[in-house]
Image (tube, rainbow, N blue to C red):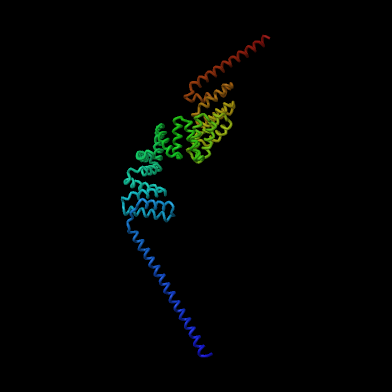
Amino acid sequence: MSCNIKLFIFALVIASVFADFIAEGAAKKENGTKKSKRQETKQALKESKNKSKNQIINPTESFYDKIWEKFKVGDKSDKEDVIKTLNKIIKDTPDEYMAYYYLGIIYDEDGEGIKALKNYETALTGFPKSSDINLRIAKLLDANNKKKEADNYYLTALSLDPNNPDALTRVGIIELENKNYNKATEYLLKSRNIKPDNSVTLKALGEAYLYQEKYNEAIEVLEQLILFDNKDASYHLLLGKAYEKQGKHEKAAEHIELASKFGKKDTSIKEAIGYDIARNLTKSGMYEDAIKEYKKEVKKNSHPALGYYEMAEIFERLDDYKKAIKAYQKAYELDKKMIDGIHRCLEIYLDNDDKENSIKMLNILKGNSKYREEANDMIESLKSEESSNSKSKSKSKKKISKTKKKK
């Protein structure tokens, strides 16, 4: 190999090594620049965070709109951030009552009633003429069964805003509970005109009409109510009662049966219904269906004796006296106050000339102050009649005997 060629190869190697060295140096420089920039950004964020912690927030209406929107649409972290921000505002500016108001709404939405109430009450000191805050406090107190306190706030809310539908409804319900039905109707109708689809208003208005015996008006309102929720047992029960009062017993039974179906787990509904389905079926002349309903109800009703007594009355109407007597006696067995059933048994036995069983019933009746005198008199009368019959039979036998001897 010639000397020139060797020199050329050596030059190439040196050039390659030099190029790698330059590239490596450039890469190190670039990485160093990136690292430096990251450190700068981190430091800037840290400084910004520290600055925001110390900075006093001067909230405006648009600020509250934004944080409320953030709370409504944000995730858990956003919601926590909103609460922290509002608490910081309160800490920095204790008389920033709007912050208390929004914090009250947020706690209210999250079901933290005690915290919500505390913030609303503070907000009210800054906005004493706010119908909305009075109403919110009233609702929280109402939910905690502090009705008297709640009523005061409802009344204040209404005095501050006479057209507030929620306040009108609640004051209407207060009048309804106090049996001031005309006044209740006045408030509830006004509320309905402003907010027609409020189910609480419609239900209360339907009840007010029922108490005033305005059954057509009650049915119109309650039928509208059921359009909003046709599976609410209390709505069907009220409508059933309205139809019952109007004398439309089939319609009444239909809605009371639906109330029973949808209110299976509600003891207050079950107690309110009681024997109403069976009674309306009876009044509709649907006796067999009524008997079936009574047989179901006596097994679960707290007063089964009443069910047996009313069932006995149906058996009497059907001239099935044997079953009627059995049901009357069962009623008395369960509740000694059902003594009228024993009196009915007596009348059935007397109508059928069953003196033996009549005496048994009279012996029970004479132990009751209501029937004691009548029972004792009848016992004497029956004994006298029996004695008279016995003497008459004896005389007849003697006459027959004398006739035979003559022959």
Q: Residue at x 31, y 54 (%)?
A: 92
**Total numbered labels:** 0
Q: Nearer the viewer, residue 150 or 282?
A: 150
User: Where is the C terminus found, in terms of image quarters?
Assistant: top right
Q: Position of residue 277 (x, y in %)?
A: 53, 33
Q: Residue at x 50, y 19 (%)?
A: 377
Q: Position of residue 291 (x, y in %)?
A: 57, 32
The answer to which quarter of the image holds residue 144 is top left
Q: Position of residue 232 (x, y in %)?
A: 50, 40
Q: Residue furthest bottom?
A: 2
Position above or below: 375 against 289: above
Q: Residue furthest top?
A: 406
User: Where is the N terminus found, in terms of image quarters?
Assistant: bottom right
Position above or below: 104 against 202: below
Q: Residue at x 58, y 15 (%)?
A: 391
Q: Nearer the viewer, residue 69 or 396?
A: 69
Q: Position of residue 308 (x, y in %)?
A: 54, 31
Q: Residue furthest front?
A: 4
Q: Residue furthest right?
A: 407
Q: Nearer the viewer, residue 362 or 218?
A: 218
- Taking the image as shown, residue 347 lies to the left or right of residue 107, namely right
